[in-house]
Each structure stands twice: as C-alpha cells, then as structure tokens.
Image: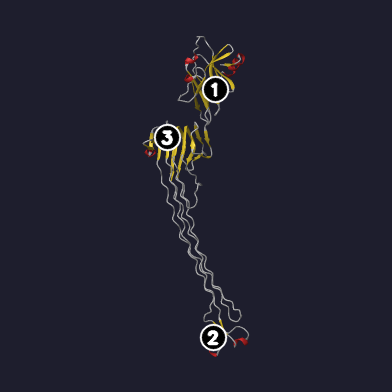
C-alpha cells in the first residue's frame, strides 16, 4: 500500500488524465507475453503486452485487467486509478478510469525502460493497491552498417536498413526474433575481401538458421563458400654451371718449321719487340678462350590452388503470414588460382680467361654468360565448392530440401 498526499494526487490526475489517447481500444493480439505481476491480488488478472510501432524502438504498452479487480469487497463506489512508476523510482499519476473500463494503452514509453503499473483506489489520503505489474519495453536491433554476429536472440525485432549487413564469417549462426523488417538488407556468410592464405582451402560455411514469427520487406541471403587460396609460385630453377676456364697459349722457341706452322695454324709471334720474334713463338695446341656458361635450370611447377568452400546449409522459418520479398543467392567458393611456374635459373657464368704473366702471348678472353633457364609450368587451379541444402518454411509452406535439417531426434543445428 502506497501513501500519496490527497492534494498531489488529484492535481496529478487532472494533468495526466488525457495523456493517453485511445485508452478504451483493445489491442489486436494478446499473446502469452511474460509478465511479472506483483502485489496482493495481481497474478494473471492484470496483464500487459508490448506492441511494436512502425519505427524501430518505438512501442506502446497495452494493459488489460479482469473486471473482478474493480469490485470492492465493501460494495462502495470507488474512483479507480492507474498509477505508473518509472524504474521503481518516479511516481507518475497516469489515469482515472471510467466505469467498466478494463483496458488502457501507454505510448509514452522508452525502449529498454521498466515501468510499474498499479491499479487501485483512494480511501481518504491512502491509495489502496489492488494489483501491480512490471513491464519492460523491448529493445530492437537496428543494423545500418556491416556487423559480424553468430547468435542474435535477445531482441524482439530486427531492423535491416539498405546498408545493413549481418555477416557470419562462415561460423554456425542462429538468428531468432519475433519480427524481421528488412529494407533491402543482407545476411551473408563471407565478404569478397575475406580471403585465405596461399595454398589453403576455402572455409566451408557452417549452418545458417533464421527463425522469426513475422518478416517483411526485401531481404537477400548470400549463401557463399569461401574462395580457395591461390597456388604458391613454383621455386626458381638453379643457376647454370660456369663455363670452362680459358687456357694459356704456350711460349716456345721458334724454328724454321714452327714459323711455317705458325702461319698455317693461326699461331702467332709474340707481339713485342722484334728481338723477341726470333727468340719465342706463341702456340696454342691446348690454349683457348673461356667457354660459354651453361643455361640455367628450368623453374619448378606452380602450386595447386586451394579448394573452394561449400555454401552453408540455410534454414529459414517464418511462422506467420508475411510480406517478405526474399532472395537466396548460393555461390560456392571458387577454387584458388593456379600457382605461377617458377622463374628459370640464372645462366652460368662464362669461363674466365687466362692471364699471361710474361705479357708475351695473347691472353684468352672470358666466355659469355649462359642464358636464363625456362620458366616452370603453371600449377593446377583448385576445385570449386559445392552447394549445400536450403529449406524455406513460410507460414507452413515448405520449399527446398527441408528433410536435410531433421533427424530422428528432431531439428539438426
């Protein structure tokens, strides 16, 4: 029983008696909303229902009480009053009831706030409380950007705007709510930028379950498997072998025969002072320039691309008749690109020349560097993922492979 001064009470009634319009209208639906009636005679005779308005996080509280609560045991005529408290603190005189009234609505409530409604009457300066209940206004989830979520179950309603995206990143996900309102929103597994490392398989998206009582608007479900990682580039081929080193000419004393041989075999007199021409002769029966370096070895074959991931199993259930424009897009993960072949090995160095310590005979020159080896063959692309079963159950109508979601023990999640 609460004590309120008579003057404060009647002044408050005068101010607040017209705060709520349409207080005599009954709510359209009264489900089994959980409520916590407290007080001496509350129980289930005093009920409420939070009714969602068109905009997100806008609600009204519909109240209903049994006529028996308005019966005074002493048979006296009473002026029945409805009081309202906000979060157990502020007392807000709410409404004076007319005879026979059993319903009222409160539109001045905020999402997430808790209100206590007390039904009773005055005896002198004392308020006699007959029933009390506590009502918490729900909070909606408004998705206007990209969010990553895997379990959404604590919201009455979910609003998806045009730019709203719920992304699961391929993990097991369950979304449940009383109502889903989508303005061209998206629920998807992977974004295009979600990639795996080179050579790795794409992730197979786990099951996606959406269960709501009502759904409306345009909604797109992008059931994608992850793209496989590209194949690694092949290993570069080994460097070619160095060419054979050049060999020095031989220095010998000339003879008449050797002079003739020198002319015929491209042997040379030493290109120095004339007095040396009769003393020595440069011959090259074993001398030669450095050889050409050998070609580099071919590069190795590129790696195999990763396997693309499978699409998720998708289960969508809408219990009541709904105006839902639904599109389910299935896109298995594409296999990873083939790895590029390895670069050919560097050509071998040319054989080095030789140095004549006497500076008499011609010095053999170095050989040229060998050519680069050929590029290795390209690898093989990874295989694409597969499409997993999809089930849509809207107001009892089934579409797709719904049996894939049930076993002997019931629904598989």
Mark 1 or 2 closer to N-term? 1
Residue linked to disc 3: 317
Percent across and percent down for residue 294 are 50, 69
Residue linked to disc 2: 262
Percent across and percent down for residue 328 are 43, 40
Assess disc 1: are there few (<14), some (14-19) or many (≥20) residues with their C-alpha within 10 Å of its C-alpha. Answer: many
The front one of 61 and 116 is 116
Element type at mark 3 = strand
Name the image quarter holding the N terminus. top right
Element type at mark 2 = helix
* Front label number (3 vs 2): 2
Name the image quarter holding the C terminus. top left
Say if 204 sits above or below 350 in the image: above
Residue drawn where x is 53% and y is 29% of the image:
58
Element type at mark 1 = strand
* Front label number (1 vs 3): 1
């Amino acid at each position: 029983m609460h004590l309120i001064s008579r003057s404060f009470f009647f002044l408050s009634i005068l101010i607040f008696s017209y705060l709520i319009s349409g207080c005599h209208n009954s709510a359209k639906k009264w489900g089994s909303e959980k409520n916590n009636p407290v007080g001496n005679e509350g129980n289930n005779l005093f009920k409420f229902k939070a009714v969602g308005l068109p905009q997100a996080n806008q609600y009204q509280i519909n109240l209903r009480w049994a006529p028996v609560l308005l019966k005074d045991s002493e048979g006296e005529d009473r002026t029945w009053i409805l009081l309202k408290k906000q979060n157990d603190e502020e007392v807000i005189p709410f409404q004076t009831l007319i005879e026979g009234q059993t319903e009222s609505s409160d539109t001045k409530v905020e999402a997430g706030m808790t209100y206590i409604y007390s039904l009773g009457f005055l005896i002198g300066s004392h308020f006699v409380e007959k029933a009390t209940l506590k009502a918490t206004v729900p909070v909606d989830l408004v998705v206007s950007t990209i969010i990553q979520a895997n379990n959404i179950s604590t919201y009455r309603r979910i609003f998806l705007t045009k730019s709203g995206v719920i992304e699961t990143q391929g993990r097991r996900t369950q979304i449940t709510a009383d109502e889903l309102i989508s303005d061209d929103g998206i629920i998807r597994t992977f974004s295009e930028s979600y990639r795996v490392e080179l050579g790795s398989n794409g992730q197979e998206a786990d099951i996606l379950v959406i269960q709501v009582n009502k759904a409306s608007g345009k909604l797109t479900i992008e059931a994608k498997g992850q793209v496989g990682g590209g194949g690694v580039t092949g290993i570069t081929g080994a460097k070619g072998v160095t060419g054979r080193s050049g060999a020095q000419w031989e220095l010998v004393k000339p003879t008449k025969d050797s002079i003739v041989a020198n002319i015929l075999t491209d042997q040379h007199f030493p290109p120095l002072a004339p007095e040396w021409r009769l003393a020595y002769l440069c011959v090259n029966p074993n001398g030669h320039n450095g050889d050409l370096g050998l070609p580099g070895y071919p590069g190795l074959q590129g790696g195999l691309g990763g396997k693309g991931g499978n699409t998720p199993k998708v289960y969508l259930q809408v219990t009541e008749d709904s105006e839902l424009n639904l599109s389910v897009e299935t896109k298995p993960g594409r296999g990873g690109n083939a790895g590029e072949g390895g670069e050919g090995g560097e050509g071998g160095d040319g054989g080095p020349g030789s140095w004549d310590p006497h500076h008499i005979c011609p010095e053999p020159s170095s050989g040229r560097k060998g050519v680069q080896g050929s590029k290795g063959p390209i690898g093989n692309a990874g295989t694409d993922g597969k499409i997993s079963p999809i089930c849509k159950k809207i107001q009892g109508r089934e579409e797709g492979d719904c049996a894939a979601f049930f076993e002997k023990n019931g629904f598989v999640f």
